Image: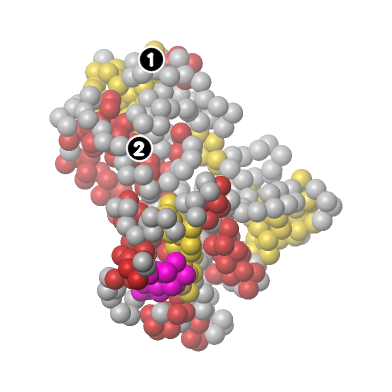
Amino acid sequence: MQEYDLVVVGSGPAGRRGAIQAAKLGRKVLVIEQGKRVGGVSVHTGTIPSKTLRETALNLSGWRERGFYGRAYRVKQEISADDLRRRLLITLDHEVEVLEHQFARNRVQHIRGKATFLTPDTMEIAKDDGETIHVQGKSIMLAVGTKPYRPESIPFDGVSVLDSDELLDIQELPRSMAVIGAGVIGIEYATIFSALDTQVTVIDPKSTILDFIDKEIIEEFIHDLRDRNMKLILGQKADKVEKLPNGKCEITLDNGRRVTCDMVLYAAGRVGATDSLNLAAAGLTADSRGRLSVNPETFQTDVPHIYAAGDVVGFPALASTSMEQGRIAARVAVGAIAKEPPKYFPYGIYAVPEISTCGLTEEEVKERGIPYECGMARFRETSRGHIMGLNSGLLKMIFSLKTRRLLGVHIVGEGATELVHIGQAVLNLKGTVEYFVENTFNYPTLAEAYKIAGLDAWNRMGDLSQAG
């Protein structure tokens, strides 16, 4: 039986970052991956595929140029599912190649197979060739990620009723689609297919969407969606999904309303991929959604030498934060010092348009009773926005009236997930409104919106240098 300093189950963002971190510290590391190739959900069915699909859809549809040339403008008149898949395969091959090279360079061993606990420190690996091996880990990290929630009441067939994993293998683009679930995944795919001129309807039992995002940003986002004829049916639950004889699908809502479409995407949640691990043998128990509870500072589970990181521990379930969780968990697991990460991290939603946020929302600032002021800038106010033909896009910053420090930055529009990092840096460095007023930004750029929003807030707050 082979013994390792760290055994990592899963090679997604948390698993690979944790494994490489431990290897860089001179430890003997094994990664177990049950998928056909390394990379986990992030590379094969999640983050990378959905973002590649988004970029391909925007490029081929001519979406970014429609502000100049009209809504009928398209780069490619007839876009097929094969067009989308071709670029996807090229991207995935590159990601896997990079990851395999990182493992080899850092001497991380990896085995393809299904891992289950025999004891708290011993795992059995069932390989594809039928061989079964046992390994021991001084520490074990569970980074198994999540999989789509698939209730038995939904007639999934992989063709007209699909989950988000199956969506990547569709054979043709639907003329109409209903998305059940208005979470991050549902909204991302709904807006991507809308950009491909598919008629999209989003259904969710809650009356609001993306509640962790600043409400003003969501209002702007929803206005943009409705402006392009996306239908949002909120506060109504999908009671029944049926496949009709004519090949279409029908969704019956709890109020009797019916929605007919060519394709249904069920995206109402995900569950931790822990059901096959035999957690009981390790002394662990998952919650009703298959997730594991951990110490948020060390990522230790209830069993001290077993760690969990990434989507399997729940919110925020981002590739970026999963990587950091994996790194911290690995350092703690091998006895190295693990510094606490900066307080504020960005949240990116790769919808069309993008949304990105960092720090406190206006609602959170109000709850804390902090006197504040906001600064706003619309992308169309920037010269770069005019050059790009942008009709929408909003950057919002929130400042403390007492300290003048930036409390939160919230963006919806083109390039939001890139632009947010300027605000993130100022937040973590405890910068004030004066940073945006006094610094020079490249012209013309969308980043100039920071200066516009900063001046907007500064004008409302008053110039302290003139006080007294």
Element type at marker 2? Answer: helix
Percent of width and height locating residue 287:
55, 27
Q: Amino acid at mark 1?
A: Pro
Asked where in the image residue 386 lies, by quadrant, the reply is bottom left
Asked where in the image residue 381 lies, by quadrant, the reply is bottom left
Q: Is residue 20 left or right of residue 362?
A: left
* Residue 467 visible somewhere in the drawing: yes
| Magenta stretch holds residue 449 | yes
Q: Main secondary structure of the magenta part?
A: helix
Q: Is residue 365 left or right of residue 465?
A: right
Work out whether residue 145 or residue 173 is closer to the camera in this orientation and state it: 145
Pointer 1 with pointer 2, Cβ within 8 A: no
Q: Is residue 313 left or right of residue 4?
A: right
On the rendered image, what quadrant is the C terminus found in?
Answer: bottom left
Q: Tell me the colour scheme of the image.
A: secondary structure
Residue drawn at (61%, 39%), measured in percent from left and top? 150
On the rendered image, what quadrant is the N terminus found in?
Answer: top left
Q: Is residue 379 left or right of residue 240?
A: left
User: Mark 2 — residue?
Assistant: 325
Q: Amino acid at mark 2?
A: Gln
Work out whether residue 433 or residue 389 is closer to the camera in this orientation and state it: 433
User: Mark 1 — residue?
Assistant: 120
Q: Read off the magenta span.
A: 446-463
Percent of width and height locating residue 98:
25, 49
Element type at marker 1? Answer: loop
Mark 1–mark 2 Cα distance, whole angstroms, equals 21 Å
* Residue 58 visible somewhere in the drawing: no
Q: Earlier in the sequence, mark 1 or mark 2?
A: 1
Q: Which residue reaches farthest bottom?
A: 69
| Magenta stretch holds residue 326 | no
